Amino acid sequence: MTQKMEKQMGTILRKYNREEGNVISILQDLQKKFGHVPREAVYWFSDRLNIPASSFFGVATFYSQFHLKPRGRHIITACLGTACHVRGAVPVEHRIREHLSLGKGEDTTKDMHYTVESVACMGACSLAPVIRIDKKIHSNVLPEEVGDILEEDREGKKR
Ligand code: FES
């Protein structure tokens, strides 16, 4: 942990007293400050507030708004819900990971450009299979189109 990080956490700490009810607020502040909830920060707050680290991790893993690992600058969301699944979502998601050279258990590219996540439905089942890159929806996606979609997106974000 860097001195700068510890100083930033000290600022957050001063906002809260020793009540477990503040766990969510602390997690929100950590997420806002660091872009994710660093594990070392959880242990740091746990020690100082005498709140079990499991309370922080329990909340952080329950709510999808919290992320325990650093995320990329852009989020690719692959829908793996039933409608998308039956129309080929799994090969599409596989192709995304392959194109981004993500290893087993990896979700974020080494350059931190993309993080790949999945959801159970985006509410656009008639357009299945669906992927979303940040806010842009791509519908009826075929595995063989994935490379072009990702290259086009990356190029667009350079401009
Ligand atoms: S199942 Fe994919 S959008 Fe509904």
Image: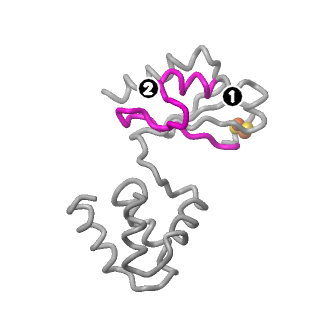
Q: Residue 60, relative to residue 146: is it above or below?
A: below
State which tag comes first along the sequence, 2 or 1: 1
Tell which of 106 and 129 is nearer to you.
Answer: 106
- Amino acid type, callout 2: Asp
Identify the residue shown where x is 57% and y is 38%.
77
Q: Residue 132: x, y in percent? A: 56, 35
Q: Which residue is mark 1?
A: 89
Q: Which quadrant, please, contains the C terminus?
A: top left
Quarter containing ligand 1? Answer: top right
Quarter of the image where one finds residue 10: bottom left
- Amino acid type, callout 1: Ala
In the image, 106: left or right of 113? right
Q: Residue 58: x, y in percent? A: 58, 66
Q: Is mark 1 within 8 Å of ligand 1?
A: yes
Q: Which region shows up in magenta?
A: 92-120
Label 1 sits on a secondary structure element that is: helix
Q: Residue 159, relative to residue 28: is it above or below?
A: above
Q: Residue 2, relative to residue 91: is it above or below?
A: below
Identify the residue shown where x is 50% and y is 29%.
103
Q: Which residue is mark 2?
A: 153
Q: Is residue 23 magenta?
A: no
Q: Residue 22: x, y in percent? A: 47, 78
